[in-house]
Amino acid sequence: MVELTPGERNTLIQVEERTRTVSRGAVLLREHDRMDELFVVREGMMMAYVLLDDGSRQIVRFLFPGDIFALSALVYRGSPDTVVALSTAVLSVIDRPTIARLSEEHPRLLCLLLVLNQIERVAATDRMAGLGRTSARARVATLLLDLRNRMRRADMDIDAIFPLRLTQEEIGDATGLTAVHVNRMLRQLEEDGMIARESGRVVIRDEAALARETNYVDRYNKLDLGWLPPGR
Amino acid sequence: MVELTPGERNTLIQVEERTRTVSRGAVLLREHDRMDELFVVREGMMMAYVLLDDGSRQIVRFLFPGDIFALSALVYRGSPDTVVALSTAVLSVIDRPTIARLSEEHPRLLCLLLVLNQIERVAATDRMAGLGRTSARARVATLLLDLRNRMRRADMDIDAIFPLRLTQEEIGDATGLTAVHVNRMLRQLEEDGMIARESGRVVIRDEAALARETNYVDRYNKLDLGWLPPGR
DNA sequence: CGGGCCCTTGAAGTTAGTCAAGATAAGTGG
DNA sequence: CCACTTATCTTGACTAACTTCAAGGGCCCG
């Protein structure tokens, strides 16, 4: 989204040098665990969730290549959420002092970090509006569209058909519904010809109609970064 | 939360020099409006909300002294939400180039911006979990505690009793409920001796019991900022 | 003192949750 | 590679939580 200078590019390559692979189902970070590193997803899909006192779970975020997480390590000692790999995933590992160094040597990169953060914050408010004010059906539809778009960002081969790597219970935990009700909503969307399902994959059959059900906005679009300082 | 250097302090004073006063009910920013400034709340209380296609509203954030908003002007041209003053409020106005300049001259201040952002992001996930996975009663209780704590941050006189500057409809729009149901929940909390109400003010009569109903965490606590670069 | 908002309460309607049971699919150890 | 175990999906019947609709009352402001 922004043309990096050679200096910035080299720095980023160094920063992201240390990588780590986690396999499907592995817990990378547990809620309240001490953390002092940040991660960038390079490959794969992950999710972050919180557990409430009554044992229920809310998935607060899905992570795809390019996403940074555990940025909250810049603020808290204990992780606010649990992070689990939904597929085998490759991560870059960054420690906190690196961010401090970056802020001094490459101010523009830090500004970009602020930008990323902001995108996420706005996406989080979209999800809040969805949870607070939309129907079960709309929430499920929104999730499907969102997942598809974000997978596509990493893999342009993906078009109308994509692997849903979630159980219906997980969809429920992301949308604030029960697995049973998610099942009914998927079935409805299928009966109405908007989607089809085939062994773990979802086919978007009528994207326009699906989009009409939702108030989904792709927050990675229409960025305006003209104000950034020059790169170094 | 961090000891600023004289240089940083002076810079901040300059940056926040331009102020603006808005009166109760005034709309500072309308959804989709073009925006190219950021604001810091100095006095008063505000809220940010989005409107959905069906006319319903989700309040996504309340703003108190010290909060920065419209940071999304760093990313988008159009405001993602509408911002309204709930009481007369005084704001500092900052333009986007100032942030770029800050990143170069005072890297630590930019890091602090990142920190603030992160606090908000985590608070947003708390609210998501509340909306998705807690009862109407718990959501209302959480909102009351949160409002009280955040008012207290600006005004240490506030203790068990605080001015609720919201209509029940607004409480509903923040918690994803209808005004009618908010009314019933407030009544319940009152009958159970947890709160009392008197002409627009709320009295927290049994904070421990109220807290037990909620999964409220004060995200402005327990920060760990040891990694910050030195100030200039 | 009249009008408009806000609050309150009851009754009825919807949406989503709970419980339960059977059918599939996906792992796992032999 | 098969048999077994366990997770996941599916569906129906019933229940609970929250919404909708409606009407009356209080209060503030002009």
Image: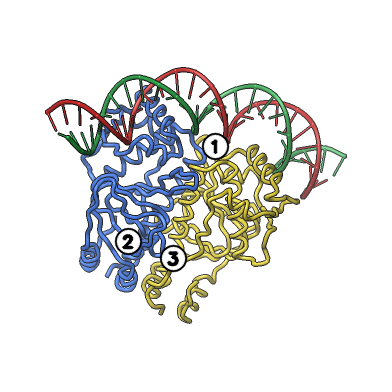
Chain colours: A blue, B yellow, C green, D red
Eye-nearest disc, 2 or 3 = 2
- Tell me which label, 3 or 1, sits earlier in the chain: 1
Residue for badge 2: A38
Which quarter of the figure is the N terminus of chain A placed in? bottom left
Q: Residues within 10 Å of mark 3 (few under 14, many from 20)?
A: some
Residue that appears at 46% across and 66% down: B223
Residue for badge 1: B55
Residue that appears at 39% across and 78% down: B230
Q: Residues within 10 Å of mark 1 (few under 14, many from 20)?
A: few
Q: Residues within 10 Å of mark 2 (few under 14, many from 20)?
A: many
Q: Secondary structure at mark 3?
A: helix
> Quick one: A226 or A48, which is closer to the camera?
A48
| Residue B114 can be seen in this image | no
Residue B26 position, x and y percent, is: 62, 53
Are labels 3 and 1 on one chain? yes
Residue that appears at 22% across and 54% down: A21
Tell me how far mark 3 sits from mark 1, CA to CA: 34 Å
> Which chain does the numbered disc 3 sit on?
B
Name the residue type under label 3. Answer: Leu
Tally of numbered discs: 3
Left-right relation of D12 to A42: right
Q: Secondary structure at mark 1?
A: loop
Please report contact status of discs 3 and 1: CB closer than 8 Å, yes or no: no
> Which chain does the numbered disc 1 sit on?
B
Q: Secondary structure at mark 2?
A: strand
Residue that appears at 30% across and 58% down: A39
Residue B138 position, x and y percent, is: 58, 45
On residue B35, which mark appears? none
Residue for badge 3: B113
